[in-house]
Amino acid sequence: MADYDAGEITDREQLAADHQTQISKQNARDVLNQLSRQLSNYDFADAQNRALADTQLRQNSRKNSADRFDAQRDLQNSAMGLLGTMGSAMNGSSTGNFMRMLESRNDRDNNTFWAQHQVNQESVENAYNDSLNQNNVARRDAMQSAEKAIRDIEGDWRANMNNINPNLYPGDTGAIDNDESVRSGQVWEDNNVTRNNARMSGYVVPDNRGRNTLPQGGANPQQSMNVGATRNRLGGNDYFSQLMNRFNGR
């Protein structure tokens, strides 16, 4: 017989200890698996929120384009109405004044619509970053809970080993049966959550790479910020064409 007073470990006690170790390891693995699923759910949510934000950004751009088109149409109608009252005045300096008026009005409209577009785009990004920040905090909460759960399992395992036989007590620290794959400390080491710091976004800039020719008639390089085809440039050699081209070249 085993010497009870000396705490000699019997085969029965060793078998019970082995079973207890297996149970504790499985409980720890279950906690780690649950954590993995939780973190995966937050990744899934982030991906969906990013897709939604990208769609909203494109929707904002589409609406801004439609609103800008309406403003351009209103400006065109106003210009046509004014032209109808100018008559022969178009052959003088009034042409330059009229062009500068249209240019100033167009610049103001551009600033108004691009500024509003910037606000709309930033609102979408801010909402996405807010959801991302919340999910990051939730990730850390899940990691904290998982670490505590595994520490409890480790503590229960030590207590149960001691209850089976004091000589089986493994000490106050370390993983279950020294198995690093179920160690509580790995929860934070293996699941790093990067802090998402808010930062200012850049300005919204239209895709206005050069196309066709410059207003002065030269080739428009692709890196140019000049938009579209030649503006207000007439090909004739009559007085009005020369007048328009001269004003346009200012």
Image (spheres, rainbow, N blue to C red):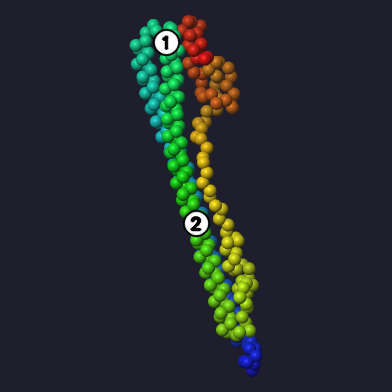
- Picture disc at residue 24: none
The vertical placement of 167 against 202, above or below, is below
- Marks counted in the figure total 2
Q: Identify the residue at image location x=58%, y=67%.
A: 184
Q: Is residue 63 above or below residue 131?
A: above
Percent across and percent down for residue 122 are 46, 40
Amino acid type at image mark 2: Val
The N terminus: image quadrant: bottom right
Q: What percent of the width, then of the height, locates residue 107?
A: 45, 24
Residue at the disc numbered 1: 94
Front residue (pair 103, 12): 103
Q: Is residue 157 visible?
A: yes
Residues at discs 2 and 1 in contact (Cβ within 8 Å): no
Q: What element carries label 2?
A: helix
Residue 180 versus residue 124 in the image, above or below:
below
Query: What residue did someone put label 2 on?
Result: 137
Mark 1 secondary-structure assignment: helix
Q: Where is residue 198 in the image (x, y as percent from the top left)?
A: 51, 46
Question: Does residue 48 appear in the picture of this structure?
Answer: no
Vertical order, 59 against 153 (above or below): above
Relative to the observer, which residue lies in front, 85 or 27? 85
Residue at image point 39% right, 31% down: 67
Q: Position of residue 179 (x, y in %)?
A: 63, 71
Crowdedness near tag 1: few (<14), some (14–19) or many (≥20) residues, C-alpha within 10 Å: few
